[in-house]
Image: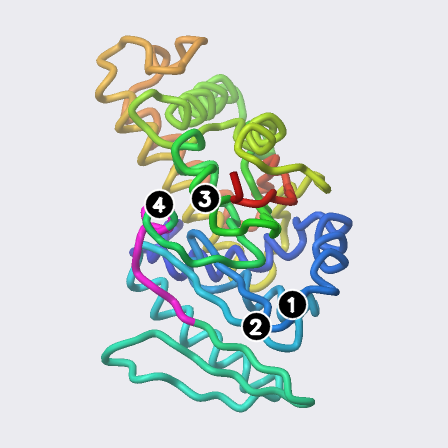
Amino acid sequence: MTRPSTYAHARYLEAKRSVDDRALHRPTLDRLREALANRAAPLRVVEAGCGTGTMLRRLLERGVPADEVVYRGYDLREDALDRAVEELEAWADGAGYAVERGDPETTRTVRLDGPGGSSVTAAFVAADAVEVARRTDAEYDLLVGCAFLDIVDLDRALAPLLGLVPDGLAYFPITFDGETFLSPPLEDGGSVDEATERAVLDVYHATMDAADRPGGSRTGRELFAALPAAGGEVVAAGGSDWLVTPPYPDDEAYFLHHLVDGIEGVVREAVAESDGERVDGDANGAAARLSPDRVSAWADARHRAVAAGRLTFGAHNLDVLARVGSNDG
């Protein structure tokens, strides 16, 4: 069997952890660490779209937060939040923290006490972070949104989110910025070829830019104008490209299968709904060169390449760190 029989979003998020680890722009992360060094404890952190909590663990591993951290992560997926608690507890146990779990029937809260008096209090909450930002008076020192702003309406989301961190920092790593590639090339003469793949990826990117869909395929570069307009100042940025090559470490083969399946799903739907017409945002008319069956044939070919350990995948992302002004006035 070349495709997984089932897919789980939480597994995908954990599978991409090693991909993100390689991708993160180190100078931007170093600048974040420096900017937080003199912040008074406790360091208050809020994360939009926290998923399985990989960014919290990653920041703790790399010594970014202060000795005392109060963290609140928001996500809409209950299964991801349950996994976040499990993964944080397992990580903390291995890192030498004493772990105290809140009542699992009523809360997803974990208290970690480490050597030297360090502590982390983490709460994972099922809610829309943008809607919470619109109605809360809570304030934080650091806002994190990993691979988040490219799947929400930037015009609607950015200002409320920045309002959570007056005189604070906003860190947006792994923000997609318009390029996807797969290798090796598909062979001409097969059931699908390179022209098919170009059309699939063109439609895939076009669906990100459709008027009825939040997010965008070039959100990374758009942040350089959007952040100042919303009250932020970009202080560091750099490329954080995903690159997955064989042999695949950890669970990265599953990561690739999940991505191919996701591309197939959105492109098949767009092509079926277009009925031979242009997809919204598809300037090249790529959808007219595809059919749902042809899209699935493309996916079959790429799943086979993953199963054979031959597929290389890349995507262009940007990490952006901004300083946020005061809410006064």
Which residue matches tag 3? 304
- Where residue 232 sits, quadrant-wise, is top right
Where 254 falls versus 91 (above or below)? above
Q: Amino acid at mark 3?
A: Arg
Report the residue at 37% width, 42% height from top.
261
Which residue matches tag 4? 134
Q: Nearer the viewer, residue 51 or 312?
A: 51
Q: Nearer the viewer, residue 81 or 271?
A: 81
Asked if labels 1 and 3 touch by Cβ distance under 8 angstroms, the answer is no
Dot placed on the residue nearer the N-terminal end, 3 or 4: 4
Q: x, y percentage for residue 271? A: 29, 21
Secondary element under disc 2, as helix, strand or loop, is strand
Query: Which disc is residue 69 wearing?
Result: 2
Q: Amino acid at mark 1?
A: Pro
Write down the region rendered in magenta.
123-132
Asked if labels 1 and 2 touch by Cβ distance under 8 angstroms, the answer is yes
Which residue matches tag 1? 65
Dot placed on the residue nearer the N-terminal end, 4 or 1: 1
Dot placed on the residue nearer the N-terminal end, 3 or 2: 2
- Where residue 238 sits, quadrant-wise, is top right
Q: Amino acid at mark 4?
A: Arg
Query: Gap between marks 4 and 2, in whole Å?
Result: 24 Å
Where 283 falls versus 222 (above or below)? above
Query: Gap between marks 3 and 2, in whole Å?
Result: 45 Å
Asked if labels 4 and 3 touch by Cβ distance under 8 angstroms, the answer is no
